[in-house]
Image: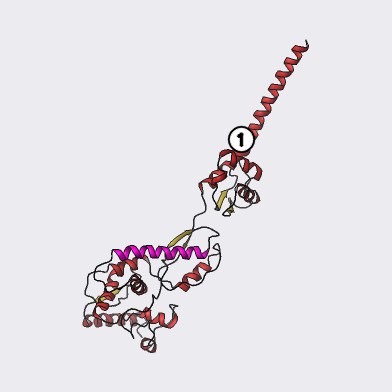
Amino acid sequence: MRRRLWSTRRRRIGAAVVGLGVAVLAIGLLVILGPGPRARSGAETLVQIPRGSGVSGVAAALEAAGVVRSATVFQLVARATGAGGSLKAGEYAIPSRASMMAVLSDLEAGRTIARSVTLPEGLTSAMIVRELRAVDWLTGDVEIPEEGVLLPETYRAERGDTRQSLLDRMRADQQALLDRLWASRQPGLPLASPQEAVVLASIVEKETGQADERRRVAAVFINRLRLGMRLQSDPTVIYAVSRGEPLGRGIRASELADRSPWNTYAHAGLPPTPIANPGRASLEAVLDPLETREIFFVADGSGGHAFAETLEAHNANVARWRRIERAQGGGG
C-alpha cells in the first residue's frame, strides 16, 4: 500500500516539476520574445551605447533608457545566444514595445541611426569648422586647418563622433581623390603640382555654380596660364579682402588694385594658397579641362556665363551683361 502511495506521489511530483518547467519556459519566452516596455515618450526611444561598452554596460544602458526591463536578463540572453561579444556601439532608435530579442538583434547587426553632415563645396576651412561646431551631436573642438585641404561632401557620422575625426576623413578623402586624379591628368597642363591643381580648382569652384560649366571655366584659366595672362578672378580679390567671407557689396577699385598676393588682377599666375575647399567636380575639371581657345567669360544673366576667344567678343558680352544689370536694377 505504501509503495503504491509513494509511486503515485512520485508521479504527481514529476508532473508538477514538468509543469513548473513548462511554466518557467513559457514565462522566459514571454520575457524574451514578448512585447517590451512602452517608450516613455513618442514612438521610440533613443539610446546611446558608448564605444567600449561590454555586455554589462550595454545592458545597463538599455535598462536605464527603459528599453528592457532587466539588465540581468538581457545579459543572460545575450551570452546564451552568443551575441554578447558582438554588440555594436552607436545610437539606436528602439521602437516602443520592442521585444528583448528584437533589441538584441538590432545591436548585434549595428542598426544605428544614420546621421550625416553635409559640407558644401566652396567653403573656406574656417567656414567648415563653423559648420562642424554647429552640429550639436558631434564632440570636441578643432583647430582651423590649412585652406583647401578638405574635401566637401556628405559624410556619415554617429552621435558622439569627434569633429576632429570628421576633419581627418575630409583631409584623407581629398588626398586620395587628388592622388588618383593627378595620376590620370591631361598631359601638358600648366600645373606643376597637385597643390597647384587645388589652388586653381578653388577658383573654379567660386567662379561658377553650374555643373556643366566647370570644365569650360577651368579651360579659360588653363589657357590664360599658358599665355601668361593674369587670371583676373574676382573671388581671389574677395579672399584677399575678407579671407572668403561674403563682402555684402561689390568689389572696390582700390581692392582690385591692391597688391595682396591673392589678388589675381595684380599678379600673374596662381595665388599662394587655395581660396576655398573645392569639391570633387572642380578638381576633376582643372585636371581634365575642355579643349577650347576661350580666354574670357562674363555673367550672362541666367546664372551662367558667356565665353569668348577674343577681346572684341568679350566686350560685346560685357556690354550685354551691363544692360541686364541695369534692367534688373530698375533701369537706373
The residues colored magenta run 157-184
Please tell me which residue is depicted at 40% across the width and 68% down the height of the picture. Answer: 121
Query: Residue 294: percent from the left, percent from the top?
Result: 23, 75
Q: Secondary structure at mark 1?
A: helix
- In the figure, 56 relative to 80: above or below? below
Q: Which residue is more in the foreground, 224 or 270?
A: 270
Indicate yes or no whether the magenta region holds residue 75.
Answer: no
User: What residue does disc 1 label?
Assistant: 29
196 relative position to 13: left or right: left
Residue 279, image quadrant: bottom left
Taking depth in this image into account, of 265 and 55 the one nearest to the observer is 55
Q: Position of residue 253 (x, y in %)?
A: 37, 88
Quadrant for the N terminus, please.
Answer: top right
User: In terms of depth relative to the viewer, which is nearer, 255 or 319?
Assistant: 255
In this view, 169 is above or below 16:
below
In the shown orientation, is residue 158 left or right of residue 18?
left
Res. 164 visible in picture: yes
Residue 269: % across, % down? 31, 80
User: In the image, residue 187 lies at what x, y percent?
Assistant: 24, 68
The secondary structure making up most of the magenta span is helix
Mark 1 belongs to which amino acid?
Answer: Leu
